[in-house]
Amino acid sequence: MSKRGFTKCSSGHFRFAVTDKDAKAAAAALTKIEALMQKTESYWTAKKANDGVALTKDARALASEAAAAAAKGSLADAGAGFEKMTAKCNACHELHLEKR
């Protein structure tokens, strides 16, 4: 468990890392999100849900870009990428919430 009480919530870890100005922790959280998006992409591929696949591919790419920005110490760019990524996540959840 992290110092903030989160165990698995990488989004929460990212937000707290930005608040703490901890670029290394932000990059780590985004890398975890990227890995989760890879698993999610595989899930939607198996379900033959092309819109879900496309959204998770986009989210994974944005997580990767944001992680790279955080690794370079640019928390502002990482945060902007994170916001774009969460828009993709939210769009997918709205489309597929009841189909899971």
Image: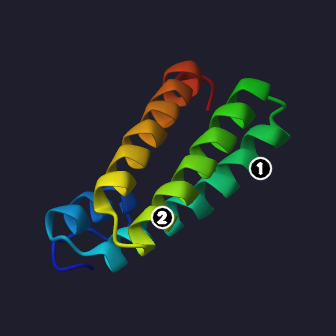
Q: Give the image location of residue 59, x and y in percent.
A: 57, 43
Q: Residue 86 carries which label?
A: none
Disc 2 to disc 1, how far (Cα)?
21 Å
Q: Give the image location of residue 31, x and y in percent.
A: 52, 68
Q: In the figure, 24 relative to 81: above or below?
A: below
Residue 43 appears in view: yes
Q: Residue 67 carries which label?
A: 2
Residue 19: quarter of image: bottom left
Instruction: From the viewer's side, name the closer residue of 62 and 88.
Output: 62
Whether residue 21 sits left or right of residue 62 in the image: it is: left
Identify the residue shown where x is 56% and y is 29%.
92
Identify the residue shown where x is 77% and y is 28%.
49
Labels 2 & 1 near each other (Cβ < 8 A): no
Residue type for callout 2? Ala
Q: In the figure, 78 relative to 21: above or below?
A: above
Residue on which the image places disc 1: 42
Say how many tags the image has.
Answer: 2
Whether residue 50 sits left or right of residue 65 in the image: it is: right
Q: Give the image location of residue 73, x and y in percent.
A: 34, 72
Dot placed on the residue nearer the N-terminal end, 2 or 1: 1
Q: How crowded is mark 2: few (under 14 residues within 10 Å), some or many (20 or more)?
A: many
**Nearer mark to the viewer, of 2 and 1:** 2
